[in-house]
Image (cartoon, rainbow, N blue to C red):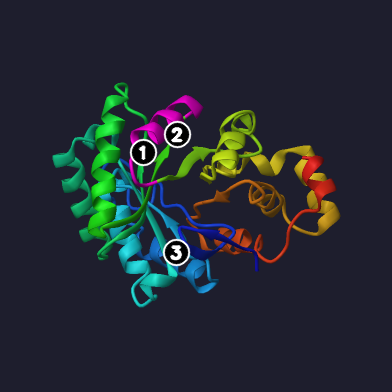
Amino acid sequence: MGYTEFCGKKVASIGVGTWNMGGRDSPDLRNDARDISVLQLALAAKVNVIDTAEMYGAGHAEELVREAVRGVPRDSLVIISKVLPSHLSEHLLRKSLDRTLQRLGTDFLDLYLIHWPPADLQLVKEGLATMEKLVQEGKIRHLGVSNFDVEEMRFAQESLRKEELHANQIEYSLMERSPEQEVIPFCEKEGIGVIAYTPLADGKVAKLPAVQKVAARTGHTPIQVALSYLTAHSIPIPKASQKAHMMEILGTLGWELSAREQTSL
């Protein structure tokens, strides 16, 4: 099985996302049992990075994560959540985090991210200052950002006094490779972890001729090839709504593309 170091822990080379689990802009409980079982399938395969956010299902996705991880040793997990850019004042951020921790049923987050850069970057400075206090208080272990470009990451780095910018979560797939131009090289140079959301581009990557060719040659599915490519530069966090899809995703673990196969994609 492929492992990497992240948030001070040994983690699987892929994680799982929860966008659209438990609803979009409001809670939707109709598929709770299905979603929990899919997450538990990943956990049983030792996938231990779980990404969620306060906005997913208006917090219900976090509640689904709580149920899915019930009984799993907390220190074996890396749980990530995100705060909205409209909640970056100290008062609102603390309230957001407390609600997130309550929904997740945990005392701390391994990684807390600013979900999107606000129009006024000064809010980033205020939010990160609060996050640094929360690290000292033990409520979060690491802090980071999401959807930040290079200049925004530099601003975030300059805003920090004691902590380091630990990660940037970005849209990254074989259909969206623009991060390879500036964002990923900057992150690798600065030691900032990259988390890739929408890594399968809603399944579109499976239709790419180059991906299909490598899949046929390696005996793996196009989905597995596409995810394996991303693990060279990031931790992809695919989301699955069916067990069969999750099983295919889990087939990414335990092997990797050769250098020649990487460059052919």
Q: Of the residues tagged 3 and 1, which is closer to the observer?
A: 1
Mark before the other along the chain sequence, 1 or 2: 1
Q: Of the residues tagged 3 and 2, which is closer to the observer?
A: 2
Residue 105 percent location from the top left of the image: 25, 65
Marking on residue 39:
3
Q: Quadrant of the C terminus?
A: top right
Task: Give the number of marks.
Answer: 3
Q: Which residue is mark 1?
A: 115
Marking on residue 147:
2
Q: Is residue 159 magenta?
A: yes
Q: Amino acid at mark 2?
A: Asn
Q: Is residue 101 left or right of residue 227?
A: left
Q: Specify the farthest residue to the top.
A: 119
Q: Are the residues flagged by discs 1 and 2 in contact, CB closer than 8 Å? A: yes
Other-residue count near label 3 (Cα within 10 Å), few / some / many at <14 / 14–19 / ≥20: many
First to last magenta residue range:
149-163
Q: Nearer the viewer, residue 33 or 77?
A: 77
Q: Quadrant of the N terminus?
A: bottom right
40 in relation to 183, above or below: below
